[in-house]
């Protein structure tokens, strides 16, 4: 197995793009990151194409400020990837992707660290509309403050970050081309769900957030169903999302509206 490093995003796409596009569901984070780099929204820190007997068999990417992403790395390629990353991007302190691939990389990268989370990847089958009071509405520019505030709340709660750090992380994602749906009851927003516009035929739903005072009424399920319907209307062939394995409520909600388990993902950090 050979790992080739690319300094130019267009050269990387010419080499590994077709491989990534052949499995857009499992490679959707790679494809979104590459699209962001091509548009000038992200700077690529690591671009590796993986080869065996002259054939592309995998890829690894990292955008500046983000974890190393190994979803498209065969576990057997870990030794070659570790050697290439040590040479070209030695400050890597986080790795994310399907759990078996993360484990293969981290076992060779360095000892210690911790597993930050385990996420379950789902793909939407037949959408089941929940019977929940209220109605959806696409967010507009007038809702920016509300969406930004709820996005900050989401990051603060999920990652346990100080609010100013959570606000910066939320702001760092606002540039992405996405749709936002608010679920309203009696004209009052009670839940929010977002989804990327399709890249490689795939839209990724998230974040989904309901303020504490509005929880346990099914609003998150309704908002998720609404944004999933929007993604399909935008042309997505596949709608995917992830849920924390340790959150049985979220997993039950997503399965209940038609999402089906694909794989489990992990993030490991040495910070």
Image (cartoon, rainbow, N blue to C red):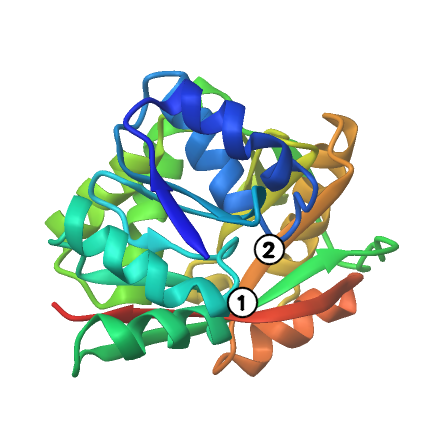
Residue at (26% x, 47% y) in the render: 66
Reading the image, the residue beneath label 1 is 243
Residue at (43% x, 28% y) in the render: 12
Reading the image, the residue beneath label 2 is 241
* Label 1 – label 2 distance at C-alpha: 7 Å
Secondary element at tag 1 = strand
The answer to the question of whether label 1 and label 2 lie on touching residues, with beta carbons closer than 8 A, is yes
Location of residue 83 in the rendering, given as x and y in whole percent from the top left corner? 25, 58
Number of dots carrying numbers: 2
Snapshot quadrant of residue 256: bottom right
Location of residue 191 in the rendering, given as x and y in whole percent from the top left corner? 53, 51
Compared across the picture, whether 127 is left or right of 214 comes to right
Q: Residue 140, which numbered label?
A: none
183, 208: nearer the viewer: 208
148, 11: nearer the viewer: 11
Residue that protrudes farthest toward the front in the picture: 53
Residue that protrudes farthest toward the right in the picture: 126
Check the image and report above or below for 223 versus 108: above
Location of residue 194 in the rendering, given as x and y in whole percent from the top left corner? 53, 41
């Amino acid at each position: 197995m050979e790992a080739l490093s690319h300094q130019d995003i267009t050269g990387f796409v010419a080499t590994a793009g077709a491989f990534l596009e052949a499995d857009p569901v499992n490679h959707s984070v790679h494809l979104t990151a590459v699209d962001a780099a091509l548009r000038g929204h992200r700077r690529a820190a690591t671009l590796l194409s993986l080869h065996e007997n002259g054939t592309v068999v995998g890829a690894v990417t990292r955008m500046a400020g983000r974890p190393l992403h190994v979803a498209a790395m065969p576990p057997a390629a870990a030794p070659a990837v570790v050697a290439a990353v040590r040479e070209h991007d030695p400050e890597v302190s986080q790795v994310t992707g399907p759990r078996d691939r993360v484990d293969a990389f981290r076992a060779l990268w360095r000892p210690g660290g911790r597993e930050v989370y385990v996420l379950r990847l789902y793909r939407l089958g037949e959408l089941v509309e929940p019977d929940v009071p209220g109605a959806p509405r696409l967010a507009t520019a007038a809702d920016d403050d509300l969406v930004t505030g709820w996005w900050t709340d989401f990051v603060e709660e999920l990652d346990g970050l100080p609010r100013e750090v959570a606000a910066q992380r939320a702001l760092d994602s606002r540039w992405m081309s996405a749709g936002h749906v608010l679920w309203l009851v009696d004209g009052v927003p009670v839940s929010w769900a977002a989804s990327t516009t399709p890249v490689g035929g795939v839209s990724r739903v998230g974040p989904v957030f309901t303020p504490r005072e509005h929880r346990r009424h099914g609003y998150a399920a309704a908002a998720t169903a609404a944004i999933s319907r929007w993604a399909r209307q935008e042309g997505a062939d596949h709608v995917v999302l992830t849920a924390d394995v340790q959150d049985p409520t979220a997993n039950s909600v997503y399965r209940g509206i038609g999402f089906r388990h694909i794989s489990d993902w992990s993030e490991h950090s040495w910070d």
